[in-house]
Image (cartoon, rainbow, N blue to C red):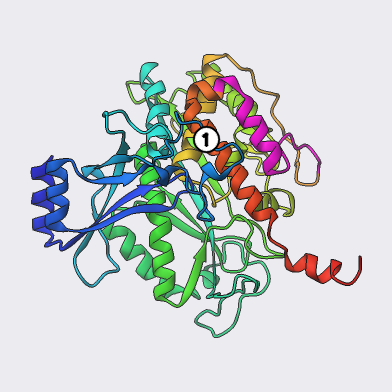
Amino acid sequence: MNSKFKKWLNENSITEVECLVPDLGGTARGKILPTKKFIEGIESNTHRMPQSIFIQTISGQYANDVEGGLPEDVYNPTDTDISIKPDFKTIRLVPWYDDPTAEVICDAIEMNGIPVQNAPRNILKKILDLYKNINFKPIVSPEVEFYLVKKNSDPDYPLEVPVGQSGRQETGKQSFGIDAINEFDPLFEDLYNFCEIQKIDIDTMNHESGSAQMEINFQHGDPLELADQVFLFKRTLRQTAIKHKLYATFMAKPMKGQPGSALHLHQSLVNNKNKNIFSNNKNKFSKIFMNYIGGLQKYTPLLMPIYAPHFNSYKRLFATYGSPKNVNWGIGNRSCGFRIPVSDNKNSRVENRLAGSDTNPYLVFAANLASGYLGIKNNIQPSAETKESLFDKDTTKLPSNISEAINLFDKNKELNEVFGEKFVKTLVAMRKVEYLAYMEVVSPWEREYLLLNV
């Protein structure tokens, strides 16, 4: 493996290497090293990081700050090191630097050689191994929504719609508007070029219903490879937007009066002959497909700390019109949490429309696939198909806030077994710390309506 790295780095005249480690929030942690030091670290097995990177919250605090702390089998308070192992399959050029720079995603390994149990990439690998054991292979295709906004250096100031090439802000709903996308052509030309250089296999882009809100669709493929690509894409888009003096945000609900941003995931299963097993020879949905949907319906409400990780995530679900907030399923029905796109047998699949784009792709993929696996394993039967629109109906079976979601996730025995208690305890503690940090903030709404009126 060392020789592969040396050959690739020499061929591309690389001077620096970024070692990237996705944390539980989906943020890129890691180190930047000169190429020589990177190779030396691989040869001597000395690429290290503190284990605390997997208990760090989105606000910069640590899950250990929760009342009572974390058990030592989850987090050692001495903050011992872990080893980070670069995965050669993930090495890529970083296209926005002047000096030739590489990036590589690293796996987190305990010093005794065991994968770190609360590292998101390892969590996804663990779920994929469950499918290997039953001779099935998951195939996924993510769709990621985001907003372009004006640069904003003051967090107390609301985000604003950016000005495009026409010199005007977008107004109204421009769903699938071609000219609305063309307003930001220079940015998207750079984005496509950067993605091509990094082998991020994006398929199509369309304008969503929000002002300067877009969606990128990825080609279908292996879940780990696609999770890596979404992880790198988010970083790439942010860097591209900054180059063009804008921000790109994956917040679930970034602006008042605008729809939220989702991460929709299409998913199917193939057997060892690469045949889609979600349909049968009679052009009908297979029993395995029905069990898979049953699993999604049963376990999704319990997995909302992954699908809706932040306080803001629930504003997308419950304070906007277009986001499904139910666990119903329907053929072609976008008002359902689980939509079955109309397709031929080869492309039979289910789309989960509930997750926000503020999520960690590794964990979202793992949560979907774990739910489907448990549905198959436990022979869970789904509800009947929903044929009516649910957009204006109160059919929610989802927790309405972080606190409720944490309790459901924490107490489920099957999820503790599938994901591992260390991961569950870590995520629960992180969400509690993040929730308490949010509750300390006094919002502009409170100052506006409570300051002089109560």
When the figure is inspected, residue 217 is found, relative to residue 290, above or below; the finding is below
The magenta stretch is 393-414
What residue type is disc 1 on? Leu
Question: Whole-percent x and y of residue 323?
Answer: 67, 49
Residue ID at (33%, 31%): 115
Residue that extends furthest to the bottom in the rendered view of this protein: 167
Question: Whole-percent x and y of residue 248?
Answer: 49, 66
Which residue is denoted by mark 1 in the rendering?
Answer: 70
Residue ID at (54%, 32%): 425
| Camera-side residue of 305 and 150 | 305
| Camera-side residue of 296 and 111 | 111
When the figure is inspected, residue 279 is found, relative to residue 366, above or below; the finding is above
> Total marks drawn?
1
Q: Specify whether 430 is left or right of 235.
A: right
Q: Quadrant of residue 173?
A: bottom right
Q: Specify whether 119 is left or right of 265.
A: left
Q: Specify whether 328 is left or right of 56.
A: right
When the figure is inspected, residue 184 is found, relative to residue 373, above or below; the finding is below
Residue that extends furthest to the front in the rendered view of this protein: 78
- How would you rate the neighbour count of disc 1 (Cα within 10 Å): few for under 14, some for 14-19, many for 20 or more? some
Q: Specify whether 405 is left or right of 232.
A: right
**In the rendered view of the protein, which quadrant contains the C terminus?**
bottom right
Residue 428 highlighted magenta (yes or no): no
